[in-house]
Amino acid sequence: MSISKNKRVEVFIDGVTTQGWGVGHIDGFAVFVANAAIGDTILVHIIKVKKNYAIGKLLDIIIPSPNRYEPDCPVFSQCGGCAYRHITYDSELNIKYKQVKDAFSRIAHMDIKPQPIISANNIDRYRNKAQFPVGFDGELKIGFYAPYSHRIINCRDCKLQPKEFTTALQVFDEFLLQNHIPIYNEKENKGLLRHIYLRKADATEEILACAVINGDALPNANILAEKLKDALPNLKGFLININKSDTNVILGDKCKLIWGQDYITDVLCGCKFRISPLSFYQVNSSQAKMLYEKAQDYASLNSDDILLDLYCGTGTIGLTMASKVKKLIGVEIVESAVKDANINAQINNITNAKFICDDASNAVKKMIENDELPSVVLVDPPRKGLSPELISTIAAIKPNRIVYISCDPATLARDCALFKTSNYTVKELTPVDMFPRTAHVECVVLMSKVQN
Ligand code: SAH
């Protein structure tokens, strides 16, 4: 049977894409379908045919997969946030495990058997940060973007976010309407309010609220602060973030404090951490603890070690390990995160840590020039991973162990293959489910030098 646009076809789903879409085959031709589950037999409407694949819209489930269950969110089928609200958590974990294993065999040509995936105890309301886009098209919309689009799907009570965020959105909703605040229009780069940005520290329950605006001031911001304070007893601060640029980037680089303080404090792995609005902080605190413990286990540190924490954010990973080593050096490119990292060292009475604000590659090159050579290197880069140059520079330091934390199995596999050409091989790999119900999976890898 040939496939063509607008055809309706029956298809059995036998795989899943890295975005969480179901994959079926018609005469060997792949069809991708959102919200389909492995094991489903479904009726699809073919909406796009490309050279190597087609995209279908799920019309009807003819025989449901045994792993299916009723999605417990009214906007699941429209929202771009969750990918796996229609299957059991066990089958989600199996998919993620296989994705990691497959990335290594497909991209790195390495046959690796990952350790069992570290699953999460809480698969709902685990996030400590949300950035809700705000729009107006006859009605006020606050929620999340539809997949691959900037169409806002109204969602005021996201199952991944703490309940307090739902309360905060109610306050914003009333305030915006009562005060006739102009809502940002992306196409025209006009209007004022762009995003509502909320953070909550898991351990202390402190909350920070922020309005991201295309302007310098939010009318009646003090009234909004009062209303937020009344509704959220644990609110520690309310800020505005100024973002006048015509881009997809959510936050501008300037914040103005309206009320309270411009940070919250969390406790993770026994350390206190100050979190400012512009600094990176792991979004799932309880799973971050599991991740950091595994990283520490892989690093197997001793009191002679010099630990380099590259892409250190607010210093969290390294600081939780600082008491084990002689010296900790953290490197991070965002200035406010480095400032937080230094404060974090201070508030935890850690005196053997230094934090450098620089690009990771530059910093490592300078360390070689200064003969300041770490014995263990930990990297936790953004999704795009490491540059080939940085990989060979790290290998040139000849650390005893390299611990690589990654939120993208594909770039991780690519980089591990490059480390292999520099004589570092993967000893062990553990996937960690940091983002239940979404298509993302985190990994931590231990590499060590090949003994010649
Ligand atoms: N390890 C930290 C943060 C990881 S996120 C934690 O667990 O909390 C990745 C961090 O890398 C971010 O803080 C980002 O600002 C930083 N970063 C991005 N590009 C960088 C570069 N070229 N050099 C150094 N740091 C960089």
Image (spheres, helix red, strand yellow):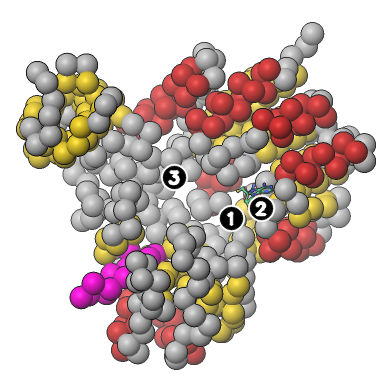
Is mark 3 in CB contact (under 8 Å) with mark 1? Answer: no
Q: Is residue 445 left or right of residue 222?
A: right
Instruction: Give the residue type that dot 3 points to.
Output: Phe
Is mark 2 in CB contact (under 8 Å) with mark 1? Answer: yes
| Magenta residue check for 234 | no
Picture residue at 76% right of the left edge, 31% below the top: 394
Name the residue nearer the viewer: 49 or 152: 49
Q: Is residue 58 visible?
A: yes
Q: Secondary structure at mark 1?
A: loop
Picture residue at 36% right of the left edge, 84% below the top: 181
Name the residue nearer the viewer: 50 or 317: 50
Label 3 neighbourhood size at 10 Å, few (<14), some (14-19), many (20+)? Answer: many
Distance between the Cα atoms at labels 2 and 1?
A: 7 Å
Q: Position of residue 299 (x, y in %)?
A: 72, 32
Q: Which mark is nearer the camera, 2 or 3?
A: 2
Q: Which residue is mark 1?
A: 281
Q: Is residue 54 above or below residue 59?
A: above
Name the residue nearer the viewer: 392 or 288: 392
Q: Is residue 172 left or right of residue 58?
A: right
Q: Secondary structure at mark 3?
A: loop
Q: Which residue is mark 3?
A: 435
Q: Which residues are magenta?
A: 132-143
Q: Quadrant of the C terminus?
A: top right
Q: Residue furthest right?
A: 371
